[in-house]
Image (cartoon, rainbow, N blue to C red):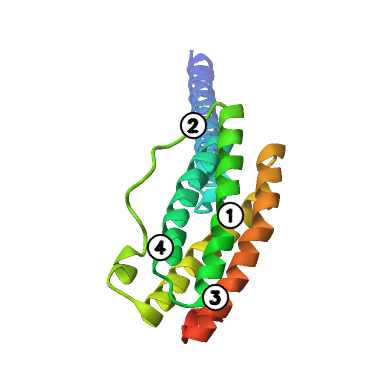
């Protein structure tokens, strides 16, 4: 009986030790799985954030996010606004250089308007309604003589600088052959206008001619 009790005690000790080892092993596995899940979850969040950051719609470069239809609509509106300012140069300009530049730009921008409307019809883009708002009106409305010429040239320079930058970005990024062809045709004329306006600004004392 004494031997039996000793054997029974040893069996109970062995069973207890085995249970303890099994429990610790299970806990370790759960801990490892938990760590792996946590790492996987963290990795998924980072990837999601990265994908969101890289999405085209999140960029500050408008030309990257612009569709062909957006480009056409925007440039029809921009061109119409520029033509209103150009007409003011024809009507109120006093120097021969302002009137000559305005006449040349009116011819070129009229052609650009025609090209844009042709492409809009081809791509079935709804032509935006003409805007009555005019950028730079406040600086020119009450001006006359040399003061008007200077304000007009300054406003036109601002518009042309912005358009040159936009068209250059479009040409470097767009995959649309028709948009690229239109931008390629317009850009040299816009640059030529910019050169004329720069000379006018220099002659009227504007610092923007630089």
Find numbered disc 1 in the image and state the secondary structure of the residue it sits on.
Answer: helix
Circle 2 residue? 27
Disc 2 to disc 3, C-alpha distance: 87 Å
Q: Could you tell which of marks 4 and 2 lies nearer the N-terminus?
A: 2
Label disc, if present, on residue 88 of the rendered structure: 4
Label disc, if present, on residue 107 of the rendered structure: 1
Q: Are marks 4 and 2 in contact (CB under 8 Å)?
A: no
- On the image, which quarter does residue 197 sit in? bottom right
In the picture, the quarter occupied by the C terminus is bottom right
Disc 1 to disc 2, C-alpha distance: 82 Å
Q: Is residue 73 above or below residue 26?
A: below
Residue 25 position in % (x across, y down): 55, 30
Residue 102 position in % (x across, y down): 52, 64
Q: Are marks 1 and 4 in contact (CB under 8 Å)?
A: no
Find numbered disc 3 in the image and state the secondary structure of the residue it sits on.
Answer: helix
In the image, is 36 to the left or to the right of 171? left
Q: Nearer the viewer, residue 108 or 34?
A: 108
Disc 4 to disc 2, C-alpha distance: 82 Å
Q: Could you tell which of marks 2 and 3 lies nearer the N-terminus?
A: 2
Q: Nearer the viewer, residue 96 or 29?
A: 96
Q: Could you tell which of marks 3 and 1 lies nearer the N-terminus?
A: 3
Classify mark 2: residues with Cα within 10 Å, few (<14), some (14-19) or many (20+).
few
């Amino acid at each position: 009986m004494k031997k039996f009790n000793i054997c029974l005690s040893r069996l109970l000790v062995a069973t207890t030790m085995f249970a303890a080892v099994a429990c610790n092993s299970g806990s370790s596995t759960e801990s490892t799985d938990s760590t792996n899940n946590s790492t996987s979850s963290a990795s998924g969040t980072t990837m999601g954030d990265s994908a969101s950051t890289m999405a085209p719609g999140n960029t500050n470069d408008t030309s990257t996010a612009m569709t062909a239809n957006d480009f056409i609509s925007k440039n029809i509106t921009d061109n119409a606004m520029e033509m209103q300012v150009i007409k003011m140069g024809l009507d109120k300009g006093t120097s021969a250089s302002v009137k000559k530049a305005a006449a040349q730009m009116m011819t070129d921008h009229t052609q650009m308007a025609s090209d844009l409307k042709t492409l809009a019809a081809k791509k079935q883009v709804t032509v935006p309604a003409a805007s009555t708002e005019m950028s730079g009106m406040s600086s020119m409305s009450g001006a006359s003589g040399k003061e008007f010429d200077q304000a007009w040239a300054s406003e036109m320079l601002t518009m042309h600088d912005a358009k040159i930058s936009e068209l250059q970005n479009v040409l470097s990024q767009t995959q649309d052959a028709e948009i690229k062809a239109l931008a390629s045709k317009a850009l040299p004329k816009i640059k030529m206008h910019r050169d004329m306006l720069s000379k006018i600004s220099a002659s009227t004392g504007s610092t923007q001619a630089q």
